Image: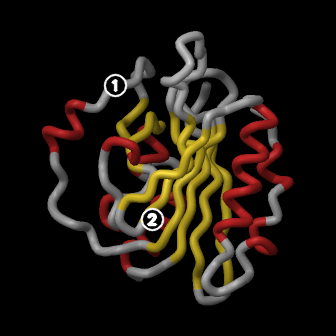
């Protein structure tokens, strides 16, 4: 995995209130296209969340999976109880220690489909030190509707399983930004 994400000056780009998502979106797309030249990126808006998505479908010779590059927006109350049948129908990972994790927590208004990713179970459930920190960020968003939040998926191959995530949540004192490995590759 390349470590170009550390080059993104999140605190500077997101200093405005509300955050300057356009600048961050430009950086995410530019960094992704350094790794995947000619990537077909599109923005999908769903409720209070937006997703930068790599769509390979128009290219019959594409070797890179369709996948989410980043998601961002403001937390909202969970719309309803989890749709367990919908969760079951989402493709499973070949990695035994993976869950179908939400990029945007369900408790913060995150949905299904585009919002689900292959996520290490320890990170997703908070059973590891990194997972505890990740879950604390998710809880903060859920407990404070309207909180700006982002998650960026990092990949080191052509699959749809991220190797790491950059996660940011705005607190009263500024941005709390972390990078989390997605388990062992």
Tell me where residue 99 sits by quadrant: top left
Image coordinates for residue 41, horizontal then vertical, percent: 60, 41
Q: Name the residue under label 2.
A: 138
Q: Which residue is drawn at 51% across and 48% down?
A: 128
Q: Is 80 positioned to the left or the right of 18 in the image?
A: left
The image shows residue 178, relative to residue 74, as above or below, that is above
Residue drawn at 75 percent across, 37 percent down: 33
Crowd rating for badge 2 (residues with CA inside 10 Å; few <14, some 14–19, many 20+): many
**Circle 2 sits in a helix, a strand or a loop, which is it?**
helix
Instruction: Locate residue 122, reporting x and y percent.
Output: 46, 42
The residue located at (69%, 28%) in the rendering is 156
85, 164: nearer the viewer: 85
Q: Name the residue under label 1.
A: 92
Q: Distance from label 1 to label 2 (Cα)?
A: 23 Å
Helix, strand or loop at mark 1: loop
Residue nearest the viewer, comparing 182 with 122: 182
The image position of residue 86, as x and y in percent, is 19, 40
Q: Where is residue 145 in the image (x, y as percent from the top left)?
A: 38, 80
């Amino acid at each position: 995995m390349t470590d170009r994400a550390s080059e993104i000056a999140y605190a500077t780009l997101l200093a405005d209130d509300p955050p300057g998502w356009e600048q961050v979106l430009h950086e995410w797309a530019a960094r992704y296209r350094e790794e995947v030249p000619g990537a077909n990126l599109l923005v999908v808006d769903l409720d209070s969340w937006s997703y930068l998505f790599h769509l390979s479908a128009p290219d019959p010779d594409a070797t890179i999976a369709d996948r989410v590059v980043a998601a961002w927006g403001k937390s909202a109350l969970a719309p309803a109880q989890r749709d367990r049948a919908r969760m079951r129908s989402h493709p499973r990972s070949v990695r035994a220690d993976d869950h179908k994790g939400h990029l945007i927590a369900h408790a913060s208004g995150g949905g299904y489909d585009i919002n689900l990713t292959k996520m290490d179970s320890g990170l997703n459930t908070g059973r590891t030190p990194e997972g505890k920190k990740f879950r604390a960020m998710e809880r903060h968003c859920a407990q404070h509707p309207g909180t700006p939040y982002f998650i960026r998926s990092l990949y080191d191959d052509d699959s749809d399983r991220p190797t790491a995530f950059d996660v940011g949540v705005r607190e009263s004192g500024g941005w709390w930004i972390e990078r989390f490995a997605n388990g062992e590759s």
